[in-house]
Image (cartoon, helix red, strand yellow):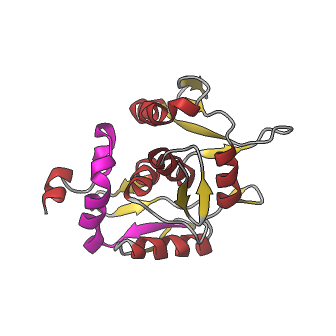
Amino acid sequence: MKIKIMDNTVGSLTQYQLSIIIGSILGDGYLRIISGRQDAFLEINHSIKAHEYVDWKYKALKNICVSPPKKRIIDETRTAYRFFTKQHKDLTRLLKIFYQNGKKIIPVSLVLDPLILAVWFMDDGSKSRKNDVYLNTQQFSIRDQKIILHKLRQIGLKARLNKDKKYYRIRFLKESVLELNRIISPYIIDSLKYKLSYDPVETCSK
């Protein structure tokens, strides 16, 4: 089955897998091509504290993966938990869309669906003690972040740029937090529901 997304035709990945992959690319996942190889692979790498989340991603992408997630000791206080997919032609297509000169970008053709946004939020979402809700998009340029704001408006979410020290990130306006939760809470795994500002069950019922 062929899947149409972002004006690009993607072949063997399911829509569910594609949304998880795109959400991961927007967040903490990385696509790369080994020198001398033809196609790209995806690396999923999180803290060991997020092992349930990594296992959830692995279960969804298992059929294109090399092996199950493994621990990787970074130093005395940090341990990562990660897995890699196989090289895949569809990942190569995504690399051409989401990377420019080796750096992640936000393509103007991006279409956000609830699962993409939920995965992105599980990767990079956070909230403050005052229940301000953020997407930690500091890795992206101001131009790219303005594209993100536009894409969020297209699905009914209002947000603005928020300066975090010397970089900018995205802060959802309080009037959009309930709608954000309504959109993403069905996909947020139990161990990461603490990132939501309100009770997801109550949110869904409204």
Residue in the foreground of this view, choosing between 161 and 89: 89
Q: Magenta stretch: residue 183 in it?
A: yes
Q: Is residue 112 visible to us here? A: yes
* Left or right of 183, for residue 80: right
Residue in the foreground of this view, choosing between 100 and 112: 112
* Left or right of 63, for residue 91: right
Residue 27, x across and y down, in percent: 52, 52
Q: Is residue 78 visible to us here? A: no
Q: What residue is rendered at 55% in x and 47% in y?
A: 28
Residue in the foreground of this view, choosing between 166 and 57: 57
Quadrant of the image occupied by residue 85: top right
Q: Main secondary structure of the magenta part?
A: helix
Q: What residue is rendered at 54% in x and 60% in y?
A: 4
Q: What residue is rendered at 41% in x and 48% in y?
A: 122
Is the C terminus in the top left, top right, bottom left or bottom right quadrant?
Answer: bottom left
Callout count: 0
**Relative height, residue 80 to residue 181 (above, below):** above
Tell me the magenta residue range.
168-195
Residue 185, x across and y down, in percent: 28, 52
**Relative height, residue 55 to residue 124 (above, below):** above
Q: Residue furthest right?
A: 36
Residue 52, x across and y down, in percent: 39, 31
Q: What residue is rendered at 52% in x and 61% in y?
A: 137
Residue in the foreground of this view, choosing between 9 and 158: 9
